[in-house]
Every structure is written in structure tokens, then in C-alpha cells.
């Protein structure tokens, strides 16, 4: 799964550039640029969880563990905006993910 490896690399970069915040609530905006020449492509919702998990596992939503809890941090996403854009080539395909800290 080449796209999951690319997602992990991008999540590492995002975590390295994320500004610290004391917020416990986040907004996540995702734009999927999908190239599917042989049909309609995958269900849109199948992409959300891997993206959230990759960001959470790298600490983008704050501390990863809650004292033995299985939660990774993506439970702090209180607002999700998701859009699919179909593109005409594999070179245009990708993901834009914006994370914003919400005021508590």
C-alpha cells in the first residue's frame, strides 16, 4: 500500500511542524484528490480513518496515550470537513489535510 507509506511520511512531517497548543478539540479538513481511471474509485469514508490515525499516532492532536486507554488522540477531532476531487492523472492525486485547534 504505497499510499499508506506516503501518508505516514506526511504525518511525520506534519507533526514536526505542528505548533504546540493546549487545545483538546480540533477541526480536520481533508481534500482527497483521487485518480480512478477504471471506475468510480473507493468509498470516500474509507480514507478518513487511516488519515486521522496517522496524524494521531504522530501526536498532531496532542499527547498520544491517555493512561492505558486505547484512544490515540483522534477522538479529539470534533469537526470534520471531507471533500473528494477527482483528478485526471496519478500525478495530480494526493491529500490535503488541515488541522486547526478549536477554542475550548
Image (cartoon, rainbow, N blue to C red):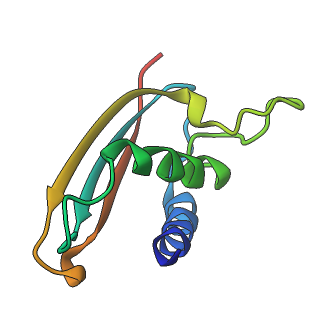
Q: Nearer the viewer, residue 11 or 22?
A: 11
21 left or right, relative to 27: right
Residue at 72%, 42% in the rendered image: 64
Q: Nearer the viewer, residue 22 or 79?
A: 79
Measured as percent of width and height from the top left, residue 12 is found at 58, 66
Measured as percent of width and height from the top left, residue 72 is found at 69, 39
101 left or right, relative to 33: right
Measured as percent of width and height from the top left, residue 36 is found at 22, 69
Residue at 41%, 51% in the rendered image: 47
Residue 87 visible to the viewer: yes
Q: Residue furthest right?
A: 68
Q: Residue furthest bottom?
A: 91
47 left or right, relative to 44: right
State whether residue 26 is above or below residue 93. above
Residue at 19%, 65% in the rendered image: 39
Measured as percent of width and height from the top left, residue 99 is found at 40, 44
Residue 37, image quadrant:
bottom left
Residue 83, image quadrant:
top left
Q: Residue furthest top?
A: 104
Q: Residue furthest front?
A: 38
Residue at 58%, 36% in the rendered image: 74
Q: How many marks?
A: 0
67 left or right, relative to 98: right
Residue 23 visible to the viewer: no
Amino acid at each position: 500500500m504505497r499510499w499508506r507509506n506516503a501518508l505516514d511520511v506526511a504525518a511525520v512531517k506534519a507533526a514536526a511542524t505542528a505548533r504546540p497548543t493546549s487545545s483538546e478539540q480540533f477541526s480536520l479538513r481533508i481534500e482527497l484528490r483521487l485518480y480512478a481511471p477504471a471506475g468510480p474509485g473507493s468509498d470516500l469514508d474509507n480514507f478518513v480513518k487511516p488519515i486521522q490515525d496517522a496524524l494521531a499516532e504522530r501526536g498532531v492532536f496532542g499527547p498520544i496515550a491517555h493512561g492505558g486507554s486505547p484512544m490515540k488522540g483522534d477522538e479529539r477531532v470534533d469537526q470534520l470537513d471531507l471533500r473528494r476531487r477527482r483528478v485526471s492523472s496519478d500525478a495530480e492525486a494526493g491529500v490535503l489535510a488541515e488541522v486547526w485547534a478549536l477554542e475550548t
